[in-house]
Image (tube, rainbow, N blue to C red):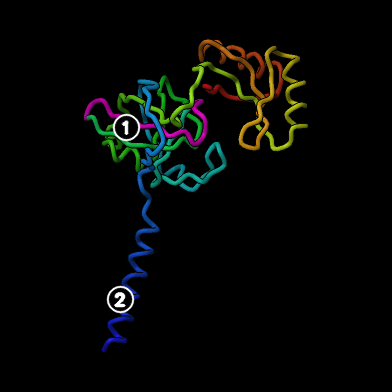
Amino acid sequence: MKSGFLKGFLILALILGLFVTGCVEDENNEEGLTKEFYQQGTASWYGENFHGKKTANGEIYNMHAFTAAHKYLAFNTKVVVVNISNKKEVTVRINDRGPYVGDRIIDLSYAAAKKIDLVNAGTATVKLYIYKQAGTSSTGKHYLQLGSFSKKQNAIKLRKRALRHTKRVRIVSEGGKFKVLVGPFDSEASAKKVLKRIRKNSNITGFVVVR
């Protein structure tokens, strides 16, 4: 009798463990972080058509995870998205680039959009707050990131190529990567203007980041 009860208990515990492991939680760990207002504008969402495909940072997009696409916020930045119409909010992690439709500022995963009642409407006006490590600061300046390499020699080669088309090109070592940056610029518009010129005169690509 006891053996049967114990066996049943273990099976139930295993099932519950698998269920918990399979759930995707809202990434809302605020310990050691400060929240600052960053941006206001239109949010949209993307789902099934992109599910299982690669995101801009190389991850596989999961529409049920709490992630989002932003044009230039650094990958893994934690962002609180507040739907102004209903005050609902969700915390997401940036792992993709976009949106590139009109003046939209962020593309949410299906799960994130559902949490703030954005799915049916398709778009909504939102406020973005970014989480930053307490004690850290940002200049708020815009830069062009032309490349990121594990080998410094590759970054040096790209810097030499970029210097043919623009000035203020430098290499920054961060997180084991060597990033080729251009800037700083006082606005996103001025950064994009230089990026457009670089793309026109070379095969170098890149995107705008805020540091």
- Disc 2 crowd rating (10 Å Cα; few below 14, some 14-19, many 20+) is few
Q: Which residues are magenta?
A: 71-86
Q: Secondary structure at mark 2?
A: helix
Q: 38 or 109: which is nearer to us?
A: 38
Judge from the rendering whether residue 59 lies leftward or rightward of residue 162; answer left or right: left
Please name the residue shown 45% across and 32% down the image: 133
Please name the residue shown 66% across and 26% down the image: 172
Count the marks: how many? 2
Please name the residue shown 23% across and 29% down the image: 87
Judge whether residue 74 is colored magenta.
Answer: yes
Q: State how far apart marks 2 and 1 are (Cα).
A: 45 Å
Eye-nearest disc, 2 or 1? 2
Q: Amino acid at mark 2?
A: Phe
Q: Position of residue 158 (x, y in %)?
A: 74, 25
Compared with 89, 25 (above or below) is below
Judge from the rendering whether residue 197 lies leftward or rightward of residue 190; answer left or right: right
Residue hosting label 2: 9
- Disc 1 crowd rating (10 Å Cα; few below 14, some 14-19, many 20+) is few
Judge whether residue 186 is colored magenta.
Answer: no
| Residue 122 tag number | 1
